Amino acid sequence: MSIKWGPIGLGLAIGSAILIAFSRSAKASPFEVNVALPEAAILTPWWNDEDFVELARICDGLKMNPADLLLVMTAESGLNPGVCNPPNEKCQVIGGHPVAVGLIQFTKVANGGVGISEYERQNVLPTMSVAQQLPLVEKYFQAQPWTRAGNEYANAGNVYQAVFAGGTMINRGTSLDTILYDSVKNKKAYDSNHLDLTGKGYINVQDLVDYMRRVSTNKGTREIYQAGLARLREATGDENLSPNLP
């Protein structure tokens, strides 16, 4: 979607505010989860085993790695379907007017593609279960020009680009250097997404990849993702399933 508050949404997802010291030079730790985490269901309480099976089915049809989409959803919502941004006490009640909602932080621009009204996005979508939201996630990607052109989502950067600024994929490309928003032409989106940590004046795909690496390595968000990945591996029977971070 076009505007994100990833770090805030993640704080909501784990039930407390998490202050993350971001560093562009942060390196990813190994993604391997060699044993099923006993607390996996506790760390991903909104998800049933069937939801992970459905996630894998959706990703197969979209030509993407389910571990990549799982990581993107962790970055956007902490895998919590009820997360709204900006967060406030009216987040899940009528009149809350959230700008972004749910697993991939649906914004107003997504309404037409997924077949919901603005009222439904603001007031109904935050109350949906994972099972109810996953079909909307599927519809969102199916509506993307990149998907309609028959293209594969080769890595997590591609998947996140589709969520963050999907229209740029066909028009500008999908390399790590592809600029998504800049501080002049897209000032509101640029200012709302604190991803340009080096002050270069724009957000590119590399910034999305760097953010996902931080999500996958920082305490709290790391545990959520690894728990989800462990359950996804069990659902798919693929013990080696891992995200493709370029």
Image: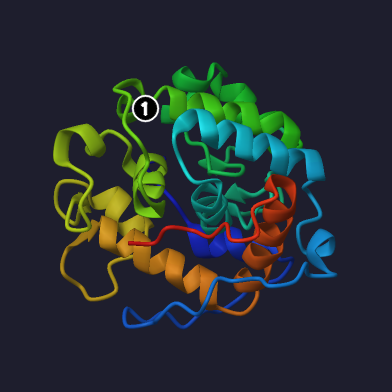
Q: Who is closer to the viewer here, 96 or 84? A: 84
Could you tell me which residue is drawn at 61 percent across and 42 percent down? 102
Q: Position of residue 37 (x, y in %)?
A: 78, 70
Percent from the top left, x then y, of residue 137?
A: 56, 33
Q: Is residue 102 left or right of residue 147?
A: right
Q: Quadrant of residue 33?
A: bottom right
Query: Looking at the picture, does residue 137 appear above or below residue 73?
Result: above
Name the kind of residue labelled 1 in the image.
Thr
Identity of the residue drawn at 46% across and 18% down: 112
List the residue tagged with mark 1.
Answer: 147
Please provide percent x and percent y for residue 147.
36, 27
Q: Residues within 10 Å of mark 1 (few under 14, many from 20)?
A: some
Above or below residue 187? Residue 31 is below
Q: How is this picture coloured?
A: rainbow
Q: How many marks?
A: 1
Residue 171 in the image, given as x and y percentages of width and height: 16, 34
